Image (tube, rainbow, N blue to C red):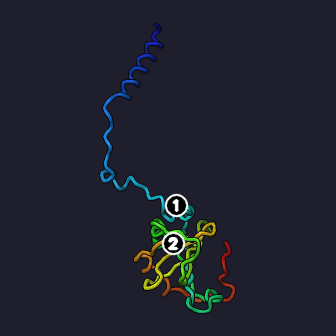
Amino acid sequence: MTYRNLILLLLFVLSVSACKSKKRENIPVSVIPVDSIRLLNRAIDVEPSLEEADSIQVLFYTNPDGDPKRYSRFFTYTTVTDSETVEKFKYNLRTVYSEYDNPMNCRSEGKAYLFGRKDVIKTIYFSTRCDSCCYIYFIKDGRFFYVKISEELKSVLRKLKKSSREPRPGQVREVNQ
């Protein structure tokens, strides 16, 4: 028997004996560290490009409960470029979502265009009226992905609304995706 064949035989015997060694114990789920579990139903996993957002233009409808066909035509807006505020939007999108075939039966207060490298990544709709509607959502492939809005993001949106202004004619144009 050659040296090579002897090594192969030894490897074979060791691998067979390893399979017959002591059985593994089942580890209870509660022992698995939570950090090692990745949530697969985070909104940002549905649209991974949202992680690339570096600025946001937020539009607040002047009368969100107005005429259903025209309420979104009148708004105030503000532009956000500071990374801390952008991160608060993305942080909220890293939470669990609910998926629907149709939009919920409540009106959005506004929308936010998330930009990455000067291109629109996604439009996020929001409502902070938590007595009836409390969410952010986006649409993908005709499906509606809703996320509960965090207290922190609600606070950010309230501050942004105070600093928003009406556009001058021709200053802001509707973004089509």
Disc 1 marks which amino acid? Answer: Asp
Question: Residue at coordinates 40% horizontally, 20% vertically from top-left?
Answer: 13
In the rendering, which numbered label is found on residue 149? none
Q: Eyeballing the image, is 85 above or below 2?
A: below
Residue 93 coordinates in the image, percent (x, y): 48, 68
Q: Is residue 82 above or below residue 3?
A: below
Q: Which residue is mark 2?
A: 146
- Seen in the picture, residue 160 relative to 19 is either above or below; the reply is below
| Residue 88: percent from left, percent from top | 45, 71
| Residue identifier under label 1 | 45
Type of amino acid at the residue the image marks with label 2: Tyr
User: Which percent across, then down, holds residue 10?
Assistant: 41, 17
> How many labels, in total?
2
Contact, CB < 8 Å: mark 2 with mark 1? Answer: no
In the picture provided, is 36 more to the left or to the right than 47?
left
Q: Nearer the viewer, residue 56 or 127?
A: 127
Precedes in sequence: disc 2 or disc 1: 1
Please give the name of the residue rendered at 45% of the width and 74% of the height, measured from the top-left corner. Answer: 148
- Label 2, secondary structure: give it: strand
Determine the residue located farthest toward the top in the rendered image: 1
Which mark lies nearer to you, 2 or 1? 2
30 or 154: nearer the viewer: 30
The residues bearing labels 2 and 1 have C-alpha atoms spaced at a distance of: 13 Å
Residue in the foreground of this view, choosing between 12 and 112: 12
**Residue ID at (46%, 7%):** 1
**Quadrant of the rendering where the C terminus is positioned:** bottom right
Mark 2 crowd level (few <14, some 14–19, many ≥20, 10 Å Cα): many
Residue at 55% across, 71% down: 100
- Tell me if 122 is positioned left or right of 38 in this view: right
Q: From the top left corner, tell me how far across and down residue 68 is, in percent.
A: 62, 88
